[in-house]
Image: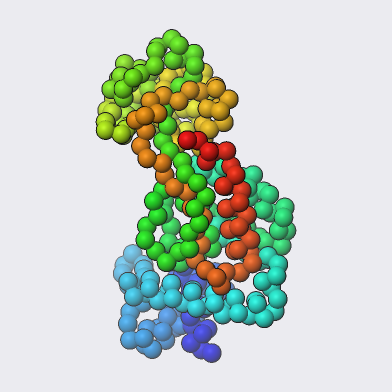
Amino acid sequence: MERYHDMQLFTALAGQPSLASAARHAQVSTVTLIRAVARLETRLRVALLERSTQGVSLTAAGSAYLADCMRLLLAVDAAEASAKGLHVQAQGNLRVFLPLLFSRYVMAPVLADYLDRYPEVHLATHYHDYYPNLHEEGFDVAVLVGELPSSSLIARAVGQVRYVLCASPDYLATHGEPAHPSDLKQHHLIAGTDQVSWDFHGYLLKARARLGCTTVQGAINSALQGAGVIRCLSYPVHAHLQSGRLGRVLPLFELPPLPVHVVYREGRNASMRVRSFVDHCVAALREHPAFHLA
């Protein structure tokens, strides 16, 4: 039992910046956590933590062992939940990782609908624009845009998005429509930085933006008012493209689409709360019009 308890305490390190915060998360003292790690290191005869003047971090062996501990403990929880009948209904805490912009434009109604359907689930969402390590950071589910790194995660494809170039019909009527990406040097470009570097199929555009916007929504608003040409992922502008308020520019030079996946780490032993959330997201996102742009 002591080994099982030590493994439980060790998994508290997932997603925590320090031993002290991990101990608080596990509701034990820092000394108790340190002793549990020390017992594991003695039993395994390998260092799990690397200690320095800046603090502690997981060694390569520690990262691998943490992932294994989390997988094994989840399997134990799943077995107990199954015996108790908890797999029948979704309940408990669920930690979800979502891309920041994607969440703003696509995920908000999906999350609200899920919470209405499953009132016993408590959802903690984390918004970042990087690829997380679900095992080390303690996430149950993630929605990821782009090619997936190789891993043991279970991935379900929901659609694809792409970078698109667009401008308002009034702007194009006044300034003309470019025939090649090089023609954009003569246009009013809207971007997040002063120096534009836009990659197209067979051409890399380097130019200077006429209008700089620090947010994607600010750039979209400016384009809707006829201020120039923007380039962004398709999901923030799909409704404007469908309504005709924005027109698609140079579609033949667009880069290949990027896949969107819902990923999770528990496989067939996933709890009902994980399976219900994954199934709900997959069904909702596959029907979302943002993924129907050719």
Note whether 217 is above or below 122 in the view shown.
above
Tell whether 253 sits left or right of 79: left
Tell whether 61 sits left or right of 278: left
Residue 164 location in percent, x, y? 42, 32
Q: Colour mode?
A: rainbow
**Camera-nearest residue between 125 and 261:** 261
Q: Quadrant of residue 56?
A: bottom left
Can the viewer see residue 190 in this picture?
no
**Camera-nearest residue between 243 and 36:** 243
Residue under the point 38% across and 22% down: 189
Residue under the point 54% across and 74% down: 74
Residue 59 location in percent, x, y? 33, 72
Can the viewer see residue 131 in this picture?
yes
**Camera-nearest residue between 213 and 198:** 198
Which residue lies most toward the top here? Answer: 174
Note whether 51 is above or below 201 in the view shown.
below
Residue under the point 60% across and 79% down: 79
Residue under the point 63% across and 80% down: 80
Note whether 58 is above or below 143 in the view shown.
below
Note whether 161 is above or below 250 in the view shown.
below
Residue 77 location in percent, x, y? 59, 77
Tally of marks: 0
Dividing the image into 4 quarters, which one contains the N terminus? bottom right
